[in-house]
Image (tube, grey):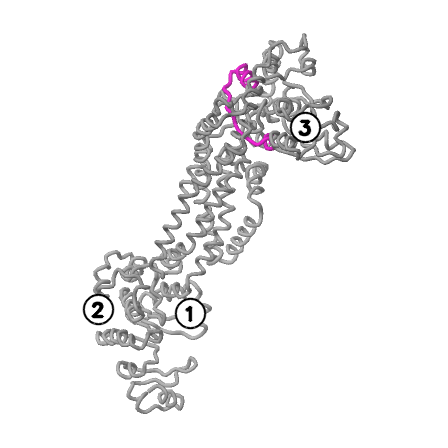
């Protein structure tokens, strides 16, 4: 979604560099390879409003991989995120928490190796946050690699293997939750934790 | 869609043939809306074309062993249509003038007449041609009488018409002080009208001839010979006498003796009897019912043109919108230029350019294709803006989400963005279709006989602009109605899940 200005990043064996260095075409090709293996969950869900939940989940496997027999798997994923009975609903008929769970299921339908979350619960009513976190916790237990940008400190502490504290686009401190929460080194991190815990 | 258009192009290519008379057909171009006595729809049977010229053309074709095939065109466009090859001969009160003779071949005159004044029955101011000084005078656009008027030194105001009926109507309701036109027209529209009278001496000399293309020398010679035969065996004179048109100038031209007419003007009498007869309600209703098949035929043509033009407009609009939004820069600029040019110029001018202008650089479309192209491109430009707005109304986050799922940009557009945009644009597109349906009336100027052309022909045949006009308007309304309903249905269906 964003291009790279400088530097490089390696994801699942694919090295992404700025289009200026490797050419726009090559960049697109590599980015596409990354996208197919990385699932993404947005702050504002971004479900497709003209499709039912089931169709939302089946459109990408069908278009990208030409798979048409994904219905059973999609239904199983919906069951897993607790939306087994909502397959034929449209996004506007679901609550925020249900929509976000559907969005997670939609990303999982592409069988990604990594899941990215961009503040997945910050647009949700506080009472609905837990149902989404529960799904993410369950995925964690199944061994899914998940990268989460979040302000849910308690959740981060309980579930994360590693935590990076980022301020203005820079990693200030990175480490296991015990160290980040137990012995924060940086003043900004200490200040932040005082406010959020 | 593209295949359908291609099929139509191929079909049209088969329909046209130049020259057709090689295959035993004489394609005759005229404007039957200009009416009696030249050629017009038979009031007794609107499917038949009658008139003294219809009879002369039939006689000439018979001499040449050809079948007559009639082609409708607006009078002002007759010579252009001939040059385009839409028909092989023009016979429609076309005066032989030096500037016309430079672009077409003319036969010898088949009729010689003059221009004459008609005024209100109670008008005592205008008794001769010179009396029109300071008055409002109506005439026909592009005719010799108009040029005679333009050449006058004294001040007066000239109003030009494209249909004689309207000029005489305006004279009868005092919008004009006088009408100055070809004598045959005055004879048929001025003289029988109880509220009008003919005054003064005939002015000028108008010679009507058959016009053919400059390179059709054989056809020109054949027609000249055929007309000469008809002059010598008296058949041409008989036709002119039956239509009450025989006059001294023509007698002199044909070297005919004796000069006065020998046969009663039966065709003229029949015309006056029907045209100026007042009709009861019952008879009028029966007449309207008899119009229905013709109006239905016109409506079908209107609908055909509109539907295919709209399909083209949607295709062109979609491609243009996509090029403008996502295309590489030169393509995007091209799309902007296309939209601006086609939206910023009148449809009528575009139709004329496509139909009459392009043949000058070797691109010749049949009327149907030209009509579809003109309407399709013009509406394609406004469709492009509709779709662009529709696509832009879909939040960028939808594109992000689709791409994050692994869809390419094109796939995201096709499967995620466009289906949502379609719902947004259905109401404006339906509105555009209904506007196109009405604008398709403009293609009557490029020889298409659709609903509006049918209206013009029927109205001028029966002098009934009110009744036939209401009838035609009702037909437009009725064929537009289902599409309004359809759009409401789509709108309701689309919005169900978007509340």
- Of circles 3 and 2, the one toward us is 3
Q: Is residue B136 left or right of residue A30?
A: right
**Chain at tag 1:** A
Return the x and y of residue A81 as percentages of the image width and height.
24, 69
Secondary structure category for the residue under label 1:
loop
Category of crowding for the residue at label 1, using alpha-carbon neighbours closer than 10 angstroms: few (below 14), some (14–19), many (at least 20): few
Magenta part of the chain: B55-79
Secondary structure category for the residue under label 3:
strand
- The disc placed on residue A80 is 2
Return the x and y of residue B121 as percentages of the image width and height.
68, 26
Q: Which residue is mark 1?
A: A2
Q: Is residue B294 left or right of residue B117?
A: left
Q: Is residue B60 magenta?
A: yes
- Whole-number angstrom distance, CA of label 1 to CA of label 3: 81 Å
Quarter holding the C terminus of chain B is bottom left
Q: Which residue is mark 3?
A: B120
Q: Along the line of sight, which residue is nearer the eye, B70 or B105?
A: B70
């Amino acid at each position: 979604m964003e291009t790279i200005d400088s530097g490089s990043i390696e994801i699942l064996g694919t090295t992404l560099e700025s289009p200026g260095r490797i050419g726009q075409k090559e960049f697109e090709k590599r980015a596409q390879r990354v996208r197919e293996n990385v699932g993404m969950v947005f702050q504002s869900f971004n479900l497709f409003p003209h499709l039912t939940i089931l169709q939302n989940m089946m459109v990408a496997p069908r278009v990208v991989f030409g798979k048409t027999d994904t219905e059973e798997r999609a239904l199983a994923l919906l069951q897993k995120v607790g939306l087994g009975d909502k397959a034929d609903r449209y996004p506007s008929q679901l609550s925020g928490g249900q929509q976000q769970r559907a969005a997670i299921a939609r990303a999982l339908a592409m069988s990604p190796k990594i899941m990215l979350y961009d503040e997945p619960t910050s647009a949700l009513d506080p009472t609905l946050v837990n149902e989404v976190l529960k799904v993410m916790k369950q995925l964690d237990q199944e061994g899914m690699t998940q990268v989460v940008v979040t302000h849910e400190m308690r959740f981060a502490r309980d579930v994360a293997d590693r935590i990076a504290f980022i301020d203005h686009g820079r990693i200030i401190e990175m480490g296991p939750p015990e160290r980040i929460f137990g012995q924060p080194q940086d003043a900004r991190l200490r200040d932040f934790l005082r406010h959020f815990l | 869609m593209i295949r359908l258009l291609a099929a139509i192009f191929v079909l049209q290519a088969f329909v046209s043939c130049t020259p057709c008379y090689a295959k035993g057909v004489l394609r005759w171009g005229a404007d039957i809306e200009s009416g009696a006595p030249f050629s017009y729809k038979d009031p007794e049977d609107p499917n038949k074309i009658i008139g003294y010229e219809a009879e002369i053309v039939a006689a000439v074709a018979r001499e040449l062993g050809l079948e007559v095939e009639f082609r409708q065109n607006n009078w002002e466009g007759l010579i252009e249509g001939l040059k385009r090859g839409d028909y092989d001969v023009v016979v429609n009160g076309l005066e032989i003038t030096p500037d016309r003779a430079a672009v077409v071949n003319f036969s010898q005159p088949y009729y010689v007449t003059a221009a004459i004044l008609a005024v209100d029955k109670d008008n005592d101011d205008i008794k001769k041609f010179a009396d029109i000084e300071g008055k409002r005078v109506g005439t026909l656009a592009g005719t010799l009488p108009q040029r005679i008027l333009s050449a006058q030194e004294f001040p007066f105001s000239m109003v030009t018409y494209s249909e004689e009926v309207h000029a005489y109507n305006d004279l009868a309701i005092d919008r004009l002080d006088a009408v100055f036109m070809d004598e045959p027209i005055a004879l048929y529209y001025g003289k029988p009208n109880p509220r009008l009278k003919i005054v003064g001496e005939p002015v000028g000399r108008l010679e009507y001839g058959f016009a053919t293309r400059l390179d059709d020398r054989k056809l020109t010679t054949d027609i000249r010979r055929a007309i000469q035969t008809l002059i010598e065996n008296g058949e041409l004179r008989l036709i002119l006498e039956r239509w009450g048109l025989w006059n001294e100038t023509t007698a002199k031209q044909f070297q005919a003796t004796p000069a006065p007419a020998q046969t009663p003007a039966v065709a003229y009498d029949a015309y006056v009897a029907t045209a100026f007869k007042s009709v009861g309600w019952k008879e009028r209703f029966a007449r309207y019912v008899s119009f229905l098949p013709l109006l239905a035929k016109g409506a079908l043509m209107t609908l055909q043109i509109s539907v295919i033009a709209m399909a083209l407009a949607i295709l062109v609009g979609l491609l243009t919108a996509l090029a403008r939004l996502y295309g590489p820069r030169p393509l995007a600029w091209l799309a902007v230029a296309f939209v601006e040019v086609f939206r910023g110029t009148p449809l009528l001018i575009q139709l004329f350019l496509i139909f009459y202008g392009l043949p000058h650089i070797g691109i010749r479309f049949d009327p149907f294709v030209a009509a579809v192209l003109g309407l399709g491109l013009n509406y394609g430009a406004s469709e492009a803006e509709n779709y662009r707005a529709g696509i832009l109304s879909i939040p960028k986050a939808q594109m992000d989400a689709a791409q994050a799922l692994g869809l390419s940009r094109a796939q995201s557009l096709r499967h995620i963005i466009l289906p949502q945009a379609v719902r947004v644009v259905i109401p404006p597109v339906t509105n555009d279709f209904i506007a196109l349906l009405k604008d398709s009336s403009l293609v009557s100027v490029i020889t298409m006989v659709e609903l509006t052309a049918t209206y013009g022909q029927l109205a001028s045949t029966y002098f009934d602009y009110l009744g036939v006009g209401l009838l035609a308007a009702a037909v437009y309304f009725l064929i537009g109605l289902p599409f309004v309903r359809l759009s409401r249905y789509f709108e309701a269906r689309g919005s169900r899940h978007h509340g």
